[in-house]
Image (cartoon, rainbow, N blue to C red):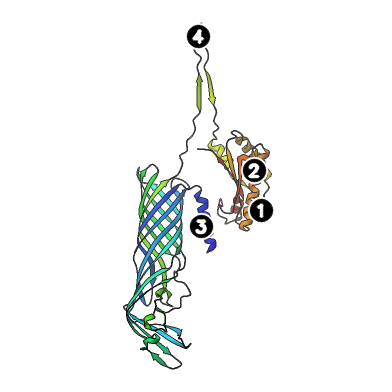
Amino acid sequence: MKVTYFLIILILCMLSTEAQEITIKATGGISGIDYQSPIGNGEKKAGFGLGVGYTYFFNDHWGITSGIEASLNRNTFELFNGTTITTLEIDDQASAFEYSVAPTGYEENQYFWSFAIPVMLHYKTPISTNTGIYIGAGVKSMIPTKQHIDASADKLTVTGYYPDLNLVFDDLSVHGFGDVNNWQDETKVSLKPSFLASAEAGLFFKLKKKMNLYTGLYFDYGMSDLQKDNQTKNLVNYSDNGTSSIKANGVMSTENSIDKNRYFALGFQVKLGFDLRKEVVVPETVIEEEIIEETAPIEIVEDTVVIEEKTIYTDAELEYIQKPIIFNVINNTAIPSSLDERLDTIAELLKRDEGIDITIIGYTCDLGSEAVNMRVGMQRAQAVANNLKANGIAEERMEVISKGESEPLVPNTSSQNRAKNRRVSIVVLIEE
């Protein structure tokens, strides 16, 4: 689980540097625990949630959404009348006995807060000038707080059976056995973290040039139970101080009381999105014209045109520079000789404007440990930087980093794909 949280945080850090839309979200609907129990019936109640997030767009339609969300989740649970729950207990004289609780009119009001980190694939497309549809699907990592329980019963019938004596005590209130009328208490129960399958869909409306309103439905469902595996308590605890001291444990702490207890949420959401994507402005070539005034005698002087040059790489040149430099052999950090001519050409292109910086990023396939792959990626990136430096590119223009195995170009599912992932990329940083 710790590794999972680390990977999610790593994804957030990677995306946050280039986040293109920030969103603020409010949700409302049914959210709570989807119970299946042989001894009672659980109902989900209305809850609400708030969240902040961002979306990194790969193009005009597709992106990855993440962030953090908080939700209030509510349930009720009613125990079937006639149910008896029995556990083994030890009294104040260290004698073992069977502790049986038979409630009438038993009910719990439950709630808990949850915090979730989503990672979702996001798609949107316009259907008119200022309106469009959006769809999202993915997973959420949810951490719940303790479940707060307000329990009550019209009557609790508490008995103790001592098998060694073959005796049943059902009217000894000073020792914790007997009837308790109009009983109520409150308690808290720990819950387990869970992964959620998540989906959302709806419409978006363009409010302003950089502001969108999203409205639609959302759905979350837990992939595992929230009840902890070590719950072995009875519905209420045994108290040798008398029936007046009986305290609630709750059905989520009761052994074999719940067959299934997964998170469920369905409702309506509203999101306000702020677009942070920068508009690319292509600089124009500036032409200045020097005009020589006529003097007597009349003399015709040709116009002198002064052109202020601004380095602009063509799309083909940028593609040539930024096309991955492949290191086919695993753990190889030396530049293949077949790439010398290409790196010479890249250096000549970069010499056009000494004010343009570059980032050189080294990558690996998924073979080997993460630490080794980070080191190999850095060595590959440094080898390319050294080559460009030898070709006249100033060292201060180059930032050298490694991303190891974290961003494969293609899935690491074959030896051919892994060879493609062993690469170095050059990113040209042109100021907009």
- In the picture, residue 355 is in which quadrant? top right
Answer yes or no: is residue 78 visible.
Answer: no
Element type at mark 4: loop
Packing grade of label 4 (10 A; few <14, some 14-19, many >=20) is few
Q: Nearer the viewer, residue 39 or 85?
A: 85
Element type at mark 2: helix
Question: In the rendered structure, which amino acid carries the disc numbered 3?
Answer: Ile
Residue receiving disc 3: 8
Q: Nearer the viewer, mark 1 or mark 3?
A: 3
For residue 292, above or below residue 85: above
For residue 239, above or below residue 121: below
Element type at mark 3: helix
Q: Are marks 1 and 3 in contact (CB under 8 Å)?
A: no
The Cα atoms of the two marked residues, 2 and 4, are separated by 58 Å
Question: In the rendered structure, which amino acid carries the disc numbered 4?
Answer: Thr
The Cα atoms of the two marked residues, 2 and 3, are separated by 31 Å
Q: Residue furthest bottom?
A: 165
Element type at mark 1: loop
Lateral position of residue 121 relative to residue 43, left or right: right
Question: In the rendered structure, which amino acid carries the disc numbered 1?
Answer: Asn
The Cα atoms of the two marked residues, 1 and 2, are separated by 18 Å
For residue 89, above or below residue 2: below
Residue receiving disc 2: 385
Residue receiving disc 1: 331
Give the label on residue 295, or none.
4
Packing grade of label 2 (10 A; few <14, some 14-19, many >=20) is many
Residue 47 x/y as whole percent: 35, 62
